[in-house]
Image (cartoon, grey):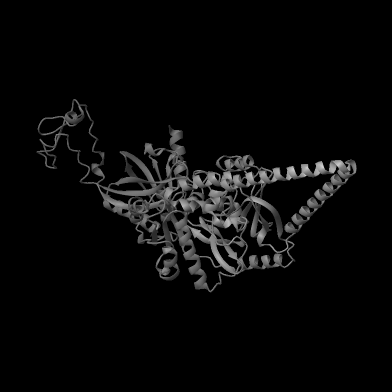
Amino acid sequence: MEKEDKEDKKEDDQRPAGLLSSQLLLKRSVYEVSLHPGVLTWTRAHLPSRLGHTVPVSEVISVRELEVASSTSISPCSCTSMCSTTTSSDSSPSRNSTTGTSMCTSGCTSGAKSSRRWQKIPQRDDEDSPHAFTVSYVQRARRAAWRLRDVTFLCADAALCGRWVCTLTEQLSALAQRPRRLLVYINPLSGKRHGERIYRHKVAPLFSRANISTSVIVTQHANHARDHLRTEAELQNYDGVVCVGGDGMFSEVMHGLVLRTQRDQGRDHHHPDQDLAQTGLRIGIIPAGSTDCICFATVGANDPVTSSLHIIVGDCQPMDVCSVHHGDAFLRYSVSLLGYGFYGDVLSDSERRRWMGPARYDVSGVKKFLSHRYYEGTVSYLPASDALGTPRDRAPCRTGCVVCQYNRPLEEEKGEKLKMEESHEGLAWRSVQGKFLAINAVSMSCACPRSPQGLSPAAHLADGTTDLILVRKASRLAFLRHLLRHTSKDDQFDLGFVEVHRVRRFRFTPRFCQSDSELDLQELLQEKEQKEALQQKEVLQQKEALQQKEALQQKEALQQKEALQQKEAQQKEVAGSQARRILGQLCREHPACCRTPPCSSCWNCDGEILPHADIQVRAHRQLIRLFARGIEETPVFDDIIPPGAI
């Protein structure tokens, strides 16, 4: 015992000097509570400090003082209709020394009337500690979720309680990264139309507890948030912008904030080579949509409480944004998916079935998979040869990502480097021509609950690159294998018809938009060669037949030829009628297909259809910042004592 006491004393002597250290009461037990710079700890008395509970001050949500003097009296008995519990000595319940139960003035035993079993009344150990304060802090749950937990400490006097509350409040006020004023946009129609209810019941109480003032705007029409941010919003009065909705709502807020920043900084966002200015305000996402892909990829969970706590603690996660241009005309910004072919066709078809809700994507996906259409074109890209990591290194982007921290060139150096690479007569650019089932460009993993790995599991949020995925023409079964690997942990790029490149820029030109391309010339030559070979074969056959046959057999040959021609004409008529019946429905849905062949698909840009197929894309590094910290693999502070024990 003496050795253990000496070891405990040595541990206490080795502890660093903290801001406060006291013995406080917690659940009838004495705890050593210490506040060090940036860390709050509490440990049961006479136990080593390593067995305590540790919470960083940056994850403390609030501190409030409580009055427990009036609440420490014994709880009233079950027969409230017959007796009353007051603080006077005449009507106070008396203790039965033999049974250890409480008797009220009317003679009944408390708890026996309602539950028909003996209930032990808690001891009044806190009579000597009439003051208390509660600390609300973040506790990590399963699957990257965060929860708000409270711990209440009892103090012997008001001075000590006030000292703890004041010191903790000063520590929280010194956290400059925390927002104080927020501009909130709510989309009432996103997802299942629960946006207002989610904010009112789950988000607003947390903001109120953290003393965050908010200005709430419920959007009335499409692009309401974007237009308000571009023109009317007084951004200097806020520390951040919060959107309650799905990925479409986030896209509106992001577009409005980026366009407003470029206008204020005098940047021409219509020019593809223009370096864009980073936004000053952070964006918070409260998930209330159908998929919430961006929230899942940056936080790790689609949970409103988790996202609210990330906003309160003031987390900051930079994020890349891709600008999409058609010539010198700006089209849109993209942060998650640019999809051509399969994903573009699914989006365009699902727009006709909006009445079905989120199920429309499943129906359109099955329909477009069965149609199995491919598109021809040329993809030119500028590979990110100087970036750290590859799309197939199986290293996902997590909190404190080394790849995102390593790729940090200055904007001026990056602009000069791109100009130098482009000046070498296109030597740095590479081109791929062919027939594609899908062309995808992702700036993040695009993970969601349906696809935990996403389209590109190793894509990074803030490395200034995008992963270009080319899916060439293949059979339906092979393409189905590729799609199914999005829902599993198998390598989705380990297929012969799939290739992936990490790029900084890329261009796409559909086949029928090219001028004298090599692809057209090669196909024309092949068609000519085939025609000439067929003609030569027919000439040789005719010559041999004419030489072998006699003059009398020529008439029979002519009759046979006429009969064959009649049969072919009949077969063509039958085949034509069958084709017209099969394609009748498609012609009614797409009248233009009878006039011009389907030469191109459309681009799916974060859930919006682009008006042009010929585009050029550039990745802008860390253009925006989110109230997030990325997906955490393991908790930063492990709780050795389970929460239920405290």
Q: Of all residues shown, which one is farthest toward the top?
A: 98
Q: Position of residue 386 (x, y in %)?
A: 68, 57
**The N terminus sits in image quarter:** top left
- 190 sits to left or right of 381: left
User: Is residue 469 or residue 77 the one in the foreground?
Assistant: 469
Q: Is residue 575 visible?
A: yes
Query: Residue 489 lies in what quarter of the image?
Result: top right
537 sits to left or right of 637: right
> Residue, x 60% and y 44% (percent of image)?
578
Is any part of residue 280 visible from this angle?
no
Which residue: 70% across, 55% down? 432
Horizontal side, residue 75 vs residue 43: left or right: left
Q: Which of 392 and 138 is in front in this view?
A: 392
Q: Quarter of the image holding residue 119?
A: top left
Q: Which residue lies furthest to the right in this view?
A: 547
* Figure check: 100 above or below 491: above
Q: In this view, does 458 lie above or below 266?
A: above
Label total for image: 0
Tell me residue 275's x, y (percent): 59, 68
- Provide residue 222's location: percent of width, then percent of height: 42, 61
Residue 515: image x %, image y %? Answer: 70, 64
Q: Quadrant of the C terminus?
A: top left
Foreground of the two, 113 or 3: 113
